[in-house]
């Protein structure tokens, strides 16, 4: 039974990493000029938000499986409180802190109107640091980090996110006419014209 939990924790960890990678790229695509090429920008954003929650769910499964894995010999508290686990003094806290950061980012979709678009976007810039932390956690603490295929996955994902981050930070802003307006109720989708709307309200 413990072996099953060990396999589940490995699979869920890799799944969470791939989903977080996809969510990060989707977020970059919907907040840059790449969005102008998407005929359905709102659909693209919904894909981004869904991937974030899927990554969070896979991470929760990863942690739950570790709790049932007697080989890991970790208590529930050591799995959710950073810096108290006896092993992996750097990698383990990075994973725990990244989990909390992902939870904050996922929840921020539902409070964007309250905290403002600029604060919301500034918060989402931390995704890049979080992805580096998750990658470091996987490389140091992941049982599959020695596998050349898995290492190639981590290296390729880091390179792709680094290029995407550079493009996001230095590319020209998306023109207003290429931005999608907000619509509907409930959790607010990204409005590519949100900054323009705020300026109009202020005027």
Image (cartoon, rainbow, N blue to C red):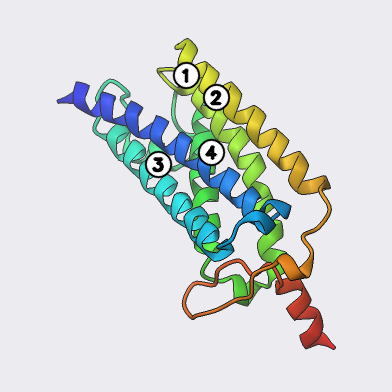
The Cα–Cα distance between marks 2 and 1, rounded to whole angstroms, is: 6 Å
Q: What residue is rendered at 59% in x and 43% in y? A: 25
Q: What residue is rendered at 66% in x and 55% in y? A: 37
Along the polypeptide, which appears first: circle 3 or circle 4? 4
Along the viewing direction, whichever of 43 and 198 lies nearer the viewer: 43
Place of residue 161 in the rendered image (x, y in percent of width and height, measured from the top left): 65, 36
Residue contact between numbered discs 3 and 4, judged by CB atoms under 8 Å? no
The Cα–Cα distance between marks 1 and 4, rounded to whole angstroms, is: 14 Å
User: Crowdedness of circle 1 by 10 Å Cα count: few (<14), some, many (20+)?
Assistant: some
Q: Is residue 179 above or below residue 79?
A: below
Q: What residue is rendered at 47% in x and 22% in y? A: 141
In the rendered image, which residue does mark 1 sit on? 150
In the rendered image, which residue does mark 2 sit on? 154
Along the viewing direction, whichever of 9 and 96 lies nearer the viewer: 9
Q: In this view, does 24 lie above or below 113?
A: above
Along the polypeptide, which appears first: circle 3 or circle 1? 3
Residue 59 numbered tag: 3
Can residue 134 be seen at all in this image of the molecule? yes
Along the polypeptide, which appears first: circle 2 or circle 3? 3
């Amino acid at each position: 039974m413990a072996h099953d939990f060990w396999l589940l924790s490995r699979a869920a960890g890799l799944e969470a990493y791939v989903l977080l990678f996809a969510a990060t790229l989707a977020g970059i695509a919907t907040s840059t000029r790449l969005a102008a090429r998407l005929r359905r920008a709102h659909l693209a954003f919904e894909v981004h938000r869904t991937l974030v929650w899927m990554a969070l769910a896979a991470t929760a499964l990863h942690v739950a499986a570790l709790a049932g894995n007697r080989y890991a010999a970790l208590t529930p508290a050591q799995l959710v409180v950073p810096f108290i686990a006896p092993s992996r003094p750097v990698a383990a806290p990075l994973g725990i802190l990244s989990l909390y950061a992902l939870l904050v980012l996922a929840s921020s979709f539902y409070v964007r109107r309250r905290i403002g678009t600029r604060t919301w976007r500034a918060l989402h810039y931390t995704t890049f640091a979080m992805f580096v932390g998750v990658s470091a956690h996987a490389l140091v603490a992941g049982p599959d980090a020695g596998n050349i295929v898995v290492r190639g996955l981590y290296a390729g994902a880091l390179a792709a996110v680094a290029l995407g981050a550079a493009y996001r930070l230095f590319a020209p802003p998306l023109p207003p006419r290429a931005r999608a307006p907000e619509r509907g109720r409930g959790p607010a989708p990204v409005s590519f014209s949100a900054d323009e709307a705020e300026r109009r309200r202020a005027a």
